[in-house]
Image (tube, grey):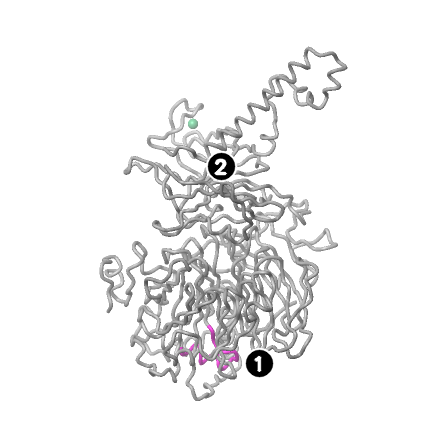
Amino acid sequence: MIHSSGNGMMSSSAASSSVGNSQSPGLKTYFKTPEGRYKLHFEKTHPAGLLHYAHGKAVTQVTLAQLKEKPAQLPPTPTGSSSAGGVRSAAARLLGGGNGSRALSFVGGNGASKAVAGSSRIGSMGVSSSSGSALCSNYDGKGTFLIFNVGDTVFISDFNSQDKDPIKSIHFSNSNPVCHAFDADAKDGHDLLIGLNSGDVYSVSLRQQLQDVGKKLVGAQHYNRDGSVNSSRCTSVAWVLEGDGAFVVTHADGNLYVYEKGKDGTGDSSFPVIKDQTQFSVAHARSSKSNPVSRWHICQGSINSISFSADGAYIATVGRDGYLRVFDYSKEQLICGVKSYYGALLCCAWSMDGKYILTGGEDDLVQVWSMDERKVVAWGEGHNSWVSGVSFDPFWSSPTSEGDVESVMYRFGSVGQDTQLLLWDLVMDELVVPLRRPSGGSPTFSTGSQSAHWDTLTPVGTLQPAPSMRDVPKLSPLVAHRVHNEPLSDLIFTQESVLTACREGHIKIWMRPAHCENQSSSSENVLSNSLKEKPLLSSKVGSYKQ
Amino acid sequence: MHNIDAHEFLNFLLNELVDILEKESQAAKGSSETSSPSEKIANGPRNLQVNGVQKEPLITWVHKNFQGILTNETRCLRCETVTARDETFFDLSLDIEQNSSITSCLKNFSSTETLNAEDKFFCDKCCSLQEAQKRMKIKKPPHILVIHLKRFKYIEQLGRYKKLSYRVVFPLELKLSNTMEDSDSEYSLFAVVVHVGSGPNHGHYVSLVKSHNHWLFFDDENVEMIDESAVQTFFGSSQEYSSNTDHGYILFYESIASDNKS
Ligand SMILES: [Zn+2]
């Protein structure tokens, strides 16, 4: 038990866990939900005395990365396609988070079976009370790591250790690192992407960084060197699912680039001038030798966050212009989109089954977009400031799943600049559409059709205007908990915990109720139990309607 | 007390402008009364403003741009009578909280408040002081919405004013749905008055103004172009003691015609 000195409140309420933070006066170390208490398990942060001028310029983002045993071995393949699909959807949702520029992102495997291995290790290690003893000192073995940026540094912490301090720091001298992504199934060594404020992007091997004792990036491949292709700030990086090393980078000027890992990019990497800044356009590289291979101009102003659907088929973007856009990735086609109530959108995330997209932004609302219905089906009201992170909880299953499976369907979370973590239940049957005026005011805008209606699908590629306040059902949060002292930047759900991070680089790990009460239970049991529960969701994987 | 407060100055300026415009108008009216009908026609455009009912207050460009109407609704908890009183405003003064947004401050501004104990309401129907519920709603939104953040607060324990450096985020676009029923009309931020300094008694003002789609930073005689994203450096600080003392103090939003609406 590690108790913080000089903080009586924390010590008394954290007696059962190893909370070693003294920076959170007045913050509770647990929060209650209908299914039980979530307890603060441990925290991760960076060494004190960091250069403060760097703060604020780069908001901390976190990637949770899973390293496998070094001799590449295939993890056990689960029997039964349905359970594989279920876990795949869950883990891949996490992957989607990792792809986006969301602050916290868990990166699981790409394939179904590999993702199972990923989540099982998170599970088994997350409750481990040993502090990193399972790790080989030379980092040849498996492990789970938190990668997060603060100021001009990328820190790496051992997620399985309750040690607050990072095990590694990588210093960038030219520009601040602002976003990163990890691919557990990268074919060659490079599995970690890091995007900089200058627009530069690096791919490296995470293991190689861990094995190096220096404070510099080692063995890196450099893309968009000195902003030669695009000099605006990177806003997010993401690996393309089963994309053979392809990855995408978004920028503050509304452009997205597709790169191929390890390709030097000797060819002409210039793209034609964008004729209309407000229109979506795709340009391919003139030379097969160039890297990036294509440019998508998505919007005017910054792309703030992206998220791939669990199956990798779709990519959602949100940005300064307030629009959520959904693209068919391989067809390079805009499918649908909608404007925020007002202001920029800051974050987005898919549901495991690809049916819903959450967005959050400067209107303080958590928005739920239905891919089936092509409309906003709910606005979550509860944040007192901008919503900076959203995520579905892929490991949550309805407690009433025996009787009425139809009713409670989704649990999701959101974090905001109000320092709060909110949890929500999305119960489609209970959503009541407010009264609509008979005269016009239909929220669904469709070009050329004045009689556009809620139930009418709009043509492919139509961007809908902001819905009216009276037309969208409202949700209230299940739980609202102040988790940090600083504005939050994102959250992630793992099988056994919820992670929250603030803009300044403090990360808290909250154990789920079942794991709080029975921490000594075999992690293998925990895993197999949750696998049994998952087929409920699996049947919906990939059941897109267009 | 702080000596030169930008909010006080804004109020002074707008009221002074109204005074001048009214005097000008009266002078024009006075001269038109002594003039012949032909001269009246010649002076047509100026006289149009005073051709209405004599006691009607003059609607100046200041009113047209800045004036909105608030409804102060009070419901007596004994007889349930609702008393609605309209009042005009040139700006909204909002109480602020740490790590909040303008949206949230506006929500609090129009939230229901219970008047009780020392602060009871005199109900005309009951003819006595009664407990009541009070609510502020915007009845008519102004064309230009001026939002004043109450960053200078009197702290009783200290016996003086203190500057609140709270982080209060303001979006570049805003809607008033929380303070108005049935309104989805949108505003766009075009100017910010920033107070620089740690206390209420000293400091400096700078401003950000959007002109021809570019943000300009005004600091005395220095003017420079800044990126739109730089606006967020003036939100305030999430920690009480911070080296950042440049805080958004007065926000100017302009109503924009809603696009794509049927
Ligand atoms: Zn009464």
x and y percent of residue A11 in the render? 24, 61
Q: Nearer the viewer, residue A483 or B245?
A: B245
x and y percent of residue B88 in the render? 53, 30
Q: Is residue A112 magenta?
A: yes
Query: Which secondary structure, mark 1?
Result: loop
What's the residue type where badge 1 is placed?
Asp
Q: Nearer the viewer, residue B192 or B125?
A: B192
Q: Is residue B239 magenta?
A: no
Residue depicted at x 45% and y 88%: A73
Which residue sits furthest right?
B38
The chain under label 1 reads A
Q: Quadrant of the C terminus of chain A?
A: bottom right
Q: Nearer the viewer, residue B176 or B246?
A: B246
* Circle 1 crowding by C-alpha within 10 Å: few under 14, some 14–19, many from 20: some
Residue depicted at x 48% and y 81%: A114
What's the residue type where badge 2 is placed?
Leu
Q: Nearer the viewer, residue A234 or B221?
A: B221
Q: Is residue A525 above or below residue B204?
A: below
Task: Compute the Cα span from label 2 to label 1.
Answer: 56 Å
For the record, the magenta segment spans A107-121
The quadrant where residue B32 appears: top right
x and y percent of residue A13 in the render? 26, 60
Residue depicted at x 64% and y 69%: A295
For disc 2, the marked residue is B92
- Ligand 1 shows up in which quadrant of the image? top left
Query: Which secondary structure, mark 2?
Result: strand
Q: Which mark is residue A244?
A: 1
Q: Is residue B10 above or below residue A544?
A: above
Q: Is residue A97 above or below residue B159?
A: below
Q: Quadrant of the N terminus of chain A?
A: bottom left
Q: Which mark is residue B64?
A: none
